[in-house]
Amino acid sequence: MKKISVIVPAYNEEESLPLLIERMNKIMEQMKEYEFELLFVNDGSKDKTIQIIKEMREKDNRISYVDFSRNFGKEIAMIAGLDYATGDCVIFIDADLQDPPELIPELVKYWEQGYDDVYAKRRSRKGEAWLKKFTSKMYYKVLQHLTQVEIQKDTGDFRLLDRRCVNALKKLRESQRNTKSMFSWIGYNKKEVLYDRDARIAGKTKWNYIKLVDLAIDGITSFTTSPLRLSTFIAIPTFMLLFGYFAYVIAKCFVVHKAIQAFQAIILLILFFSGVQILLFGIIGEYLGRIFNETKNRPLYLVNEYNGKKEMNEK
Ligand code: UDP
Ligand code: MG
């Protein structure tokens, strides 16, 4: 019997958990041909979340949990979930029921067809302000321009991952995690499933705009080092301006026989030195980017098949 691990990161979710369990029970009832594990990662909740999880585990041994020493954030909760999951595949799901568990049979169906990463794509988002939707859309656009890796739009963390994706993700152990970028980075056979994202069932969102900007910057800087290249790009027009102005002043000097004036010399000096400085920054940035990529210590590649056998990334 194949085993499915459902990973639920939970931070102050005492109100949502009973409702989540209720709906998950129905799904597990429907899918009797699979063994289930419901793995909660309690991310340092300050309410009764952990007590509720412990009570639930007493009644149902399919429930297990990892309890963090403090709040580490959802990204870290997710990697802990991957580390502790024992299933042949895992499914990430939010505790607040914004990701409908009713989609799980469909995700599993595609997994059985041989897909490794079945991700749920939002057709609509309920209960979210238009500004959040708009910024999220623009963000994906910018990110896609900055990187070579293909990014899935309108996709959260709600997805099914085959064991070999899990093993691959476990190898990416950088501390500043941006899991979304990692899902793209690992590759493998991806399949998209559309769904309507519901509004949060109870409690409040843990996100605010400061956290979102944080996440956005993390996303860009973990995906690519192109912001570091910015100074190189600024240096080029600066030097063009310098040469243009220099040519103009010199030409005037010789053609009209007018001596170089003090303000012209100052402009030339400013352009020259700021150009040199920006260029040097750019060079430092290029090296810094390389160091950054090396220190991430990622595996250089991931293999899909070897001699017709699926590579499981166990080593
Ligand atoms: N979460 C977590 N640690 C945190 C913040 C959130 O484990 O520090 C969990 C939270 O319990 C929920 C999921 O991550 O299961 C998504 O959080 P939330 O609903 O607040 O985010 P949103 O859906 O608004 O993006
Ligand atoms: Mg939510």
Image (spheres, rainbow, N blue to C red):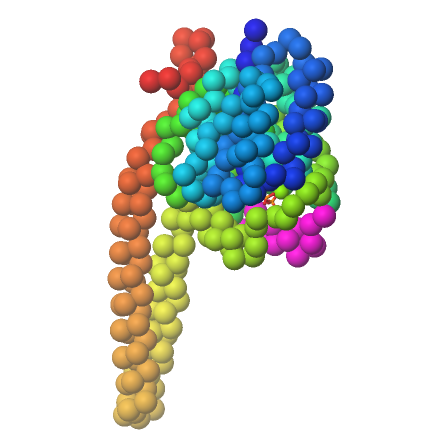
Asked whether 121 or 232 is in front, the reply is 121
Asked whether 122 or 191 is in front, the reply is 122
What is the quadrant of residue 59 in the picture?
top right
Q: Residue at x 52, y 57 (%)?
A: 210
**Residue 60 relative to residue 30: left or right:** left
**Residue 140 relative to residue 104: left or right:** left
Q: Is residue 61 visible?
A: yes
Q: Is residue 222 within the magenta segment?
A: no
Q: Please state the horizontal and vertical placement of residue 263, each as a whole percent of the image.
A: 32, 89
Q: Please state the horizontal and vertical placement of residue 119, each as a whole percent of the image.
A: 60, 30
Ligand 2's quadrant: top right
Q: Is residue 190 visible?
A: no
Asked whether 160 or 87 is in front, the reply is 87
* Quarter of the C terminus within the rendering: top left
Q: Residue at x 27, y 50 (%)?
A: 287
In magenta, the rendered stretch is: 127-142
Q: Residue at x 66, y 24 (%)?
A: 24
